Image: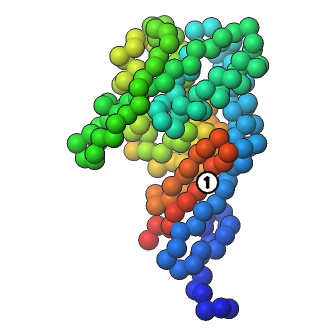
Amino acid sequence: MSGTELTDAPPDGGVFAESGSKFSKTVMSADDIRRALTRIAHEIIERNQGLDHVVLVGIQRGGSWVAERLGSVIASIEPESAVPVGLLDPTFHRDDIGLRPVMAGAQSRIPVALDGAVVVLVDDVLFTGRTVRAALEALNDYGRPRAVQLAVIVDRGHREVPIRPDYVGKNLPTSRSEDVAVTPESVTIRGGQDA
């Protein structure tokens, strides 16, 4: 050995990290993400017996590109059924608004009234569930949907509120000290191990 001390491997094996450093591991490629979105699109169509009254709403920021990409995939599967895609910023509905600084949020853009619609909330990562809880509250500003479903690329566990996704690209158990980054190119776990 070159004198570098090695620590335990990150979850599921992978790259060893030097003592005190953090690891990074790609767990989904762009092709994996594309396949997951295609599967989720088919599941949405099947579960709702078509696309009548279905509206996709991406939770700002991470869910924005996911909702738009999912809308494109659905359009390629069912070209005669246009599914509206909107964006929702739940910042001012969060329950931790006094506990941390409020970042300037993105603007909500909901293209249709949600009364009687089946809203599929879309996000990149489901972690504690608090962002989804805030998004559910924020949806009330735009009408009363008939039903709300949840689609995520990654469900990493650690729920603090009783939220469960309807559509999941990948279940990815993580530690609380890790961070999951989702981009159109990859899903990467970064961080250290819990002490």
Residue 168 location in percent, x, y? 62, 37
Q: Tell me which amino acid carries mark 1.
A: Thr
**Residue shown at 60% from the left, 87% from the top:** 4
**Residue shown at 60% from the left, 82% from the top:** 6
State the residue position of label 1.
188
State whether residue 11 is above or below residue 127.
Answer: below
Judging depth in this view, the residue of 93 and 116 nearest the camera is: 93
**Residue shown at 68% from the left, 23% from the top:** 72
State whether residue 143 is above or below residue 134.
Answer: above
Whether residue 171 is visible to the viewer of this picture, yes or no, is no
State whether residue 165 is above or below residue 50.
Answer: below
Report the colour scheme: rainbow
Secondary structure under the numbered disc 1 in the rendered image: strand
Say which quadrant the N terminus sits in.
bottom right
Residue 156 location in percent, x, y? 54, 48
User: Seen from this angle, which residue lies furthest left?
Assistant: 98
Relative side of 163 to 10, left or right: left
Say which quadrant the C terminus sits in.
bottom left
**Residue shown at 61% from the left, 92% from the top:** 3
